[in-house]
Amino acid sequence: MGTGMLSSEEVVEYYRADAMKLFRYLSWLETKTGQSTSSYYGADGIATNSIAFPVYDSTLLSFVKEAENTCFMDRNYVYVYTRNRLKTGKDELRLIEKATIRDMDNMAGILSHYILGGRRKAALWSQGVSNGVYVALLKKMKDLIEYWDGERVKNTQE
């Protein structure tokens, strides 16, 4: 991370390629916002003899895997939450709404919270879909990149 000393054009260049990888999930995420993307496996009699475990939508898992391999992942995402006093999903959405190209590190921190935090608490992956944070992040990133690039970014489907 640490793009604070870069110009706006350099910030766009730094994030563009990895952002493009994530934009292809935008339409799917928009359709799933507010819905559950996980369920608990519970075949006949398993609930009485075993521990139920979550089963996640395959597209969500693909998105998580893709996001994990981008420059957006920041293990120090906790500092973004502390510095910006983020406590709830509404706080996150408010920060995303007001973000400029200079705030790409903050948006990367929010994405990291859901993706990396989901390794310990997997419910965060689904929560990012249902509360609309993923959609808000990707739309804002797309708008900022389009603005600074001066050209429209295509939404490619999987």
Image (spheres, grey):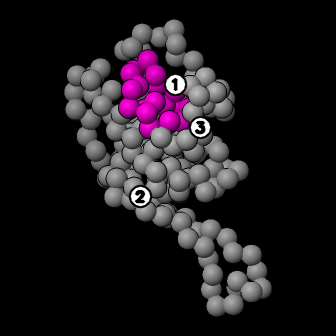
Amino acid identity at mark 3: Lys
- Image point (52%, 13%), residue name: 4
- Separation of disc 1 and disc 2 at Cα? 26 Å
Towards the viewer: 130 or 20: 130
Q: Position of residue 115 (x, y in %)?
A: 58, 45
Tell me which corner region of the image, top left, top right, bottom left or bottom right, holds residue 47: bottom right
Mark 2 sits on what residue? 34
User: What residue occupies the far right of the structure in this picture?
Assistant: 49
Query: Is residue 84 rendered to the left or right of residue 147?
Result: right
Which kind of residue does numbered mark 1 sit on?
Asp
| Residue 82, quarter of the rendered image | top right
| Numbered label attached to residue 87 | 3
Query: What is the distance, in whole Å, between disc 1 and disc 3 at their CAs?
Result: 18 Å
For the residues carrying marks 1 and 3, which lies nearer the camera in this image? Answer: 3
Determine whether 99 is above or below 46 in the image: above
Q: Which residues are magenta?
A: 91-110
On residue 105, which mark appears?
Answer: 1
